[in-house]
Image: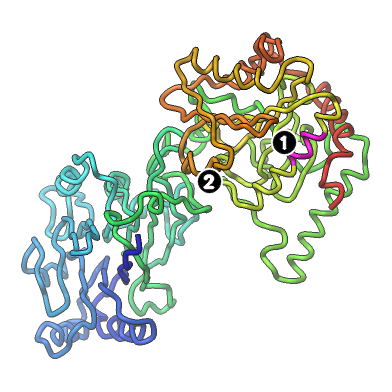
């Protein structure tokens, strides 16, 4: 903790325009202070007489680079002559050629992996190209260590093929751009920053994750940045400044923090065909079927005769948009986190059904559970795309608590206590299940014991969370877990190891010790027709309305 970050500059194709580059770097340093190093990707040397003349000034010492500069090798046969040693060497004072491929580790512990040139399309490989053997020689020594987490920086001249999948689109022809072997390299080395050039474009991809959510422990995210050529006429960005603390000296919890706009890993798509990808997105055998819970805000709230309620919701939506246009304030309305792929639980998802929504707040909404344990079994869900309770922002947590409080009062009026549970395992989007249990059926202690005993029977040790301990302190983002909240305020927690029965929460509540409705443990056995669902939802919406705080706002 408290390490001083390194200040780094990265640059795209220089193409011999050394004076323009170093003048720009000097201007930046004059304004913001000294940087530690400059990393150049793409073609460093030019082939024109002017470029050659500029290089001679630095080579002879007439001029000196104002910063430690590290460059990659040739990407064309024309510039190979500028690199006398394939293993890397100092070409001029403060200008160092890294070499064909390898890893540079600084005194600070910063680890920079690099590959020069383009992918070889023929054998033997030309001097400005690399082969798959080069990449294997780079990857194997690094990844064979059990302590390997990734590298801080990866430098390649070529783009990785497909880096744009699940992310924002670049302004290049994606059909011909990039190398598959570079994509494979990036996937294996897990760089925190990956820089490339050659395409004449500036592209900063959204950060992507390096772990499979709920199946692997959280890992750091990767950022891919492509830079344009120095002094390009379109004035596209060619210099990128950033601060970085070496991975080796970082606090592990800081290292694995996931930004809100993080996406899936672009190199780990299940199939090459996007249509197939969509079909297989929910095909994991243990994944709950995608059609268990669907909700939507668009259109009528099915089956409801309360026009006032529907009008109020659409008015609120419209008012938010108008304020945004009139005042130019991006906060009106708040932009909710979006999924990187199809999500069946985000309120704006085009696949959702329209009739199960009971109430809509600013950050959360309430919906009837499809195939519910009891007629008043509901779900509290965030409107935006959040994986679990521990990922929620403070305002979402605050509104979720308001819904919990409203539901407790509602159930109390019916002679019921409520049990909440969440399964952060093999699920796409947070679903907080809320199940009412009649007061005369059993005590809170009975419910607690039922969870503890049934967990023990399945060799799972459920622990009680201390009274003032937050779930976030126990379960860092990415941790698979099962969590129960009782009406007494007591909380139970199980850190999921390898396997977990998906219906565990329902099975405990349906058991003889609690609701005594064992045949309803599986939601698929409790499905209703759409008409029945609409009627159930309308009744519950009307019933809950006096406790619904969104009507008061």
Question: In which quadrant will I find the N terminus?
Answer: bottom left
Query: Residue 469 falls in which quadrant of the image?
Result: top right
Residue 400 placement, left or right of 55: right
Asked whether the residues under the numbered discs 2 and 1 touch, taking CB atoms below 8 Å apart as contact, a structural biologist would say no
Image location of residue 20, percent across then percent down: 30, 84
Q: CA distance from mark 2 to mark 1?
A: 19 Å
As helix, strand or loop, the secondary structure at mark 1 comes to: loop
The answer to whether residue 184 is above or below residue 215 is below
Span shown in magenta: 403-409
Query: Residue 198 falls in which quadrant of the image?
Result: bottom left
Q: Is residue 404 magenta?
A: yes
The answer to whether residue 205 is above or below residue 25 is above
The colour style of the image is: rainbow
Q: Is residue 202 magenta?
A: no
Name the residue rendered at 76%, 60% in the picture.
Answer: 321
Front-most of residues 161 and 264: 264
- Residue 132 in view: no
The disc at residue 150 is none
Residue 62 placement, left or right of 149: left
Image location of residue 225, percent across then percent down: 38, 61
Name the residue rendered at 9%, 86% in the picture.
Answer: 60
How crowded pointer 1 is (Cα within 10 Å; few <14, some 14-19, many 20+) is rated as: many
The answer to whether residue 52 is above or below residue 510 is below
Name the residue rendered at 22%, 58% in the picture.
Answer: 114
Name the residue rendered at 48%, 22% in the picture.
Answer: 500
Image location of residue 236, percent across then percent down: 43, 73
Q: Main secondary structure of the magenta part?
A: helix
Dot 2 corresponds to which residue? 340
Q: State which tag comes first along the sequence, 2 or 1.
A: 1
The disc at residue 295 is 1
């Amino acid at each position: 903790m408290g390490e001083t970050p390194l200040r780094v500059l990265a640059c795209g194709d220089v193409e011999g325009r050394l004076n323009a580059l170093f003048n720009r770097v000097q201007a930046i340093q004059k304004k913001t202070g000294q940087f530690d190093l400059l990393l150049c990707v793409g073609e460093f040397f030019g082939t024109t007489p002017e470029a050659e003349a500029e290089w001679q000034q630095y080579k002879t010492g007439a001029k000196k680079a104002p910063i430690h500069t590290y460059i990659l090798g040739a990407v064309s046969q024309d510039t190979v002559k500028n690199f006398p040693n394939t293993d890397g060497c100092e070409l001029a004072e403060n200008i160092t050629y890294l070499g064909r491929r390898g890893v540079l580790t600084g005194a600070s512990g910063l680890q920079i992996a690099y590959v020069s040139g383009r992918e070889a399309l023929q054998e033997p490989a030309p001097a400005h190209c690399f082969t798959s053997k080069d990449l294997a020689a780079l990857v194997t020594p690094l990844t064979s260590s059990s302590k390997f987490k990734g590298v801080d920086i990866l430098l390649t001249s070529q783009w990785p093929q497909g880096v744009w999948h699940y992310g924002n689109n670049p302004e290049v022809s994606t059909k011909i751009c990039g190398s598959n072997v570079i994509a494979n390299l990036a996937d294996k080395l897990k760089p925190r920053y990956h820089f490339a050039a050659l395409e004449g474009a500036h592209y900063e991809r959204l950060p992507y994750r390096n772990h499979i959510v709920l199946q692997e422990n959280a890992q750091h995210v990767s950022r891919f940045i492509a830079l344009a050529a120095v002094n390009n006429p379109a004035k596209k960005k060619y210099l990128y400044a950033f601060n970085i603390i070496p991975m080796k000296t970082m606090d592990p919890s800081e290292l694995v923090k996931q930004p809100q706009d993080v996406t899936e890993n672009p190199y780990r798509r299940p199939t090459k065909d996007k249509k197939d990808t969509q079909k297989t997105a929910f095909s994991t055998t243990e994944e709950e079927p995608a059609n268990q819970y669907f909700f939507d805000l668009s259109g009528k709230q099915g089956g409801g005769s309360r026009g006032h309620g529907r009008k109020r919701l659409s008015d609120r939506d419209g008012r938010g948009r108008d304020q945004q246009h009139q005042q130019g304030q991006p906060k009106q309305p708040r932009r909710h986190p979006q999924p990187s792929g199809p999500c069946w639980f985000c309120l704006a998802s085009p696949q959702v059904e329209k009739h199960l929504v009971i109430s809509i707040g600013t950050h959360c909404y309430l919906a009837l559970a499809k195939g519910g344990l009891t007629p008043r079994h509901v779900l509290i869900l965030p409107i935006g795309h959040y994986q679990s309770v521990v990922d929620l922002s403070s305002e979402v947590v605050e509104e979720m608590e308001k819904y919990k409080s409203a539901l407790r009062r509602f159930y109390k009026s019916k002679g019921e206590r409520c049990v909440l549970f969440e399964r952060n395992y093999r699920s796409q989007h947070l679903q907080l299940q809320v199940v009412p249990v009649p007061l005369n059926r059993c005590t809170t202690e009975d419910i607690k014991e039922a969870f503890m005993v049934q967990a023990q029977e399945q060799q799972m040790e459920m622990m009680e969370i201390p009274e003032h301990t937050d779930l976030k302190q126990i379960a860092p983002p990415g941790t698979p877990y099962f969590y129960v909240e009782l009406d007494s305020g007591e909380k139970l927690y199980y850190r999921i190891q390898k396997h977990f029965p998906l219906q565990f929460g329902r099975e405990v509540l349906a058991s003889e010790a609690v609701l005594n409705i064992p045949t309803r443990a599986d939601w698929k056995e409790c499905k209703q027709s759409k008409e029945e669902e609409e009627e159930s939802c309308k009744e519950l919406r009307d019933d809950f309305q006096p406790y619904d705080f969104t009507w008061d706002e």
